[in-house]
Amino acid sequence: MCNCEAITSAARGSLPSGSRWSLGEKSKDKTMNEVADKTIKNKGGRPELKIKRNTSINVRLTSLERVLIEGKARQAQLSPTDWFRKAAKKAKVHPRITPEDMKVLHILAGMANNLNQLTKLSHTYGLLRFAKDCQELIERINGIFNQFKGE
């Protein structure tokens, strides 16, 4: 019979204390400095980017739109992605029509109806009779247009 326990215990004791199989003191005595040194050590490879872009937006384009964007990017000596980012940052977005603007447009449409009615009456009864009313209405419409443009 083989005395296996004696061989394995003798083999354990014969391993050097620095080997990875030994249960020597070297593996137990890791200090915090050694652990900290390993985290600071350069792993190699490409350095981490300062700005991480981790989301994306998919945009569907026609072939003409793609050619236009690629051409503009080429003129700016940028990739299409970089050109798109810069264009998005500089773009001005005009809001949709607000309820206040809708009220103004409704009033303007009513004034346009009145002008059409006055024009029809002026053709029927003569231009000089309604010229003053038409002129006043035109001035009011121009004022509203200018107010609408200024906002």
Image (cartoon, grey):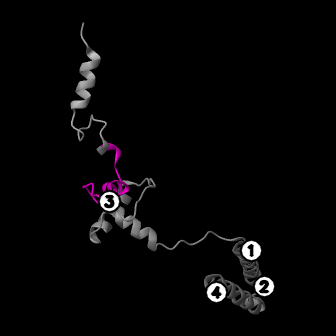
- Asked whether 26 or 145 is in front, the reply is 26
Q: Nearer the viewer, mark 3 or mark 1?
A: 3
Q: Which residue type does callout 4 highlight?
A: Asn
Image coordinates of residue 27 in percent, x first then y, are 31, 43
- Which element type, helix, strand or loop, lies under badge 3? helix
* Category of crowding for the residue at label 2, using alpha-carbon neighbours closer than 10 angstroms: few (below 14), some (14–19), many (at least 20): few
Residue neighbourhood size for the residue with mark 1, other residues' Cα within 10 Å, grouped as few (<14), some (14–19), many (≥20): few
Q: Which residues are magenta?
A: 27-48
Report if residue 41 lies within the magenta region.
yes
Looking at the picture, which amino acid does disc 1 mark?
Lys
- Whichever of callouts 1 and 2 sits on the residue coming sooner in the sequence is 1
Q: Give the answer, above or below, for where 82 lies relative to 56.
A: below
Q: Residue at x 24, y 10 (%)?
A: 2
Q: Residue at x 78, y 91 (%)?
A: 129
Q: Residues within 10 Å of mark 4 (few under 14, many from 20)?
A: few
On residue 40, the disc is 3
